Image (cartoon, rainbow, N blue to C red):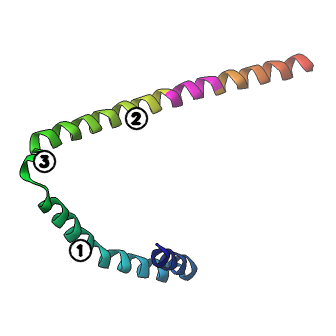
Amino acid sequence: MSAFRTVVDDAAFCGPAGEFVLARETRSAIPALRSAQASALARLPARQRASDASLRVRLRAALDEGQRQREEIAWTHEELALAHGRVRELELDRRVRRT
């Protein structure tokens, strides 16, 4: 981790040129990570691997949950806007009463 931290620190210090170095370092690590993941998957017996159908069900559930959360956030933003409007009205009423 310290080596990665050094690369990140160098990238931040060097600005755009450093971002290029960080991108190059990251790109060079991707094939190694992919091969490690593939070999780990190959070690699992076929019976223990998730089936395509199971993965699709899990993916659909995750997508549905993400959609539900987006809708909840939108509703919360609307409620916050309404509450902010009410606060503004109360502040204006209080100012009018003082004068």
Q: Nearer the viewer, residue 76 or 12?
A: 12
Tell me the amino acid under the disc marked 2. Answer: Arg
**Residue drawn 14% across and 61% down?**
43
Quadrant showing the C terminus: top right
Nearest to viewer (mark 3 / mark 1): 3
Q: Which mark is residue 84?
A: none
Residue at 55% over, 24% down: 79
Residue numbers of the magenta segment: 76-83
* 32 part of magenta stretch: no
Name the chief secondary structure element in magenta: helix
Mark 3 and mark 2: span between their CA atoms?
Answer: 34 Å
Residue ID for mark 2: 70
Callout 3 amino acid: Gln
- Say left or right for 81 vs 33: right
Observer-nearest of 69 and 80:
69
Please, is residue 84 above or below residue 9 in the view?
Answer: above
Q: Does residue 97 sit above or below 71 in this rendering? A: above
In the image: residue 46, left or right of residue 97: left
Q: Is residue 62 left or right of residue 41?
A: right
Q: Residue at x 49, y 79 (%)?
A: 16
Q: Where in the figure is residue 75, as x and y percent of width and height?
A: 47, 26
Outermost residue toward the right in this view: 99
Disc 1 marks which residue?
31
Residue 31, above or below 41: below
State the separation of the CA atoms marked 3 and 1. 25 Å
For the residue labelled by badge 3, is the local secondary structure a helix, a strand or a loop? helix
User: Mark 1 falls on what kind of element?
Assistant: helix
Mark closest to the chain's N terminus, 3 or 1: 1
Task: Characterize the local packing of mark 2: few (<14), some (14-19) or many (20 or more) Cα atoms within 10 angstroms.
Answer: few
For marks 1 and 2 on the same chain, the one whose residue lies earlier in the sequence: 1
Image x and y of residue 70, in percent: 40, 35
Q: Which residue is label 3 attached to? A: 48
